[in-house]
Image (spheres, rainbow, N blue to C red):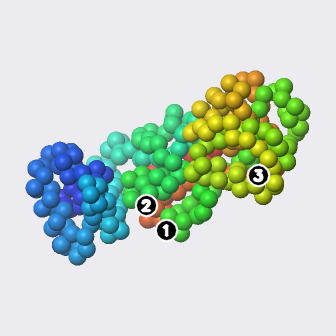
Amino acid sequence: MIQTDALAAFAVFADHLNFTRAAAALHLSQPALHVKVAKLAATVGRPLYQRSGRTLTLTPEGEAVARFARDLDARMAAFLTEVRDAEAVRPLTLAAGEGAYLYLLGEVVRTFRPLRLVNRDSARMLASVRAGRVDLGIGVLEVLPDDVTTVLLASYPQTLVLPVDHPLAGHAELTLRDLAGVSLVLPPANRPHRRTVERALRAAEVDWALAIEAEGWPLTLHFVTLGVGLSIVNGCVRPPAGFTAREITDLPRVPYYAVHLPSRADDARLAELLSAVRLAI
């Protein structure tokens, strides 16, 4: 039989993936934590983590056990709150990227309580949802995974940010061919937004130049305001003073999704948070 204290200990270990730090967080000795994890693995009948050099990673079975442990902890907390009729509840954890926090979720951050915030790009957000480390994730998804629940929140056009006195600002909307000869501020080559833009420009046979690579919308817009180049951003991104944005009609719209585990579909508090997010966006 699986002991709940072993599950709780493993959940902490899964968060740290380091026996020293996890043992300290649990106020246990490292040998004691090793024993708990080993006994849990023996009960499950599968290894729960693997070592590559000095790095520990969870096996698929370890991810499942950690997810179960966190879900059990959340259900226990909800049960105790209900039994005690207490107002204090476990904070929900929301994971989103920098752009979503800056331009979409301000009202949720200001008003929803209790709420714990973590900053994650879409790939890390999905991993955190799958592992049960966050309750709700918000991000742009190129492909919809089938192991989590996804809810479309909104989609935005891709827009060119440029000075209000730039010749292209006289157009109500733009096409990729209007960008011929333009120098662009774009993310690094491995980022999804960069891949999308480059593929589209190449397909449209548009000659363009890379002005500079920038990670994140604030730095991107900073370089645009310095005159380094123009930039293509999601339509939810607000241009700085003295600049405007024009939709590029032949670029795909950018969809933002909320993501949670299917097992949380009937969670009333999660539904409340998702409703707040939808109203904000």
Alpha carbons under labels 3 and 2: distance apart? 34 Å
Q: Which residue is mark 1?
A: 147
Residue at the spot x=34%, y=64% of the render?
Answer: 63
Determine whether the residue tagged by mark 3 lies in a helix, strand or loop.
Answer: helix
**Which numbered disc covers residue 201?**
3
In percent of width and height, residue 46 lies at 25, 74
Residue at the spot x=77%, y=36% of the render?
Answer: 245
Q: Which residue is mark 2?
A: 130
Residue at the spot x=56%, y=54% of the render?
Answer: 258
Alpha carbons under labels 2 and 1: distance apart? 8 Å
The amino acid type of the residue labelled 1 equals Asp
Number of other residues with Cα within 10 Å of mark 2, as a class: few under 14, some 14 to 19, many 20 or more? many
* 196 sits left or right of 83 in the view: right
Q: Nearer the viewer, residue 168 or 42?
A: 168
Specify which label sits upstream in the sequence, 1 or 3.
1
On-image quarter of the N terminus: bottom left
- Looking at the image, do the residues carrying marks 1 and 3 touch, with CB atoms under 8 Å apart? no
- Looking at the image, do the residues carrying marks 2 and 1 touch, with CB atoms under 8 Å apart? yes
- Looking at the image, do the residues carrying marks 3 and 2 touch, with CB atoms under 8 Å apart? no
The amino acid type of the residue labelled 3 equals Leu
The part of the image, by quadrant, that contains residue 209 is top right
In percent of width and height, residue 223 lies at 65, 29
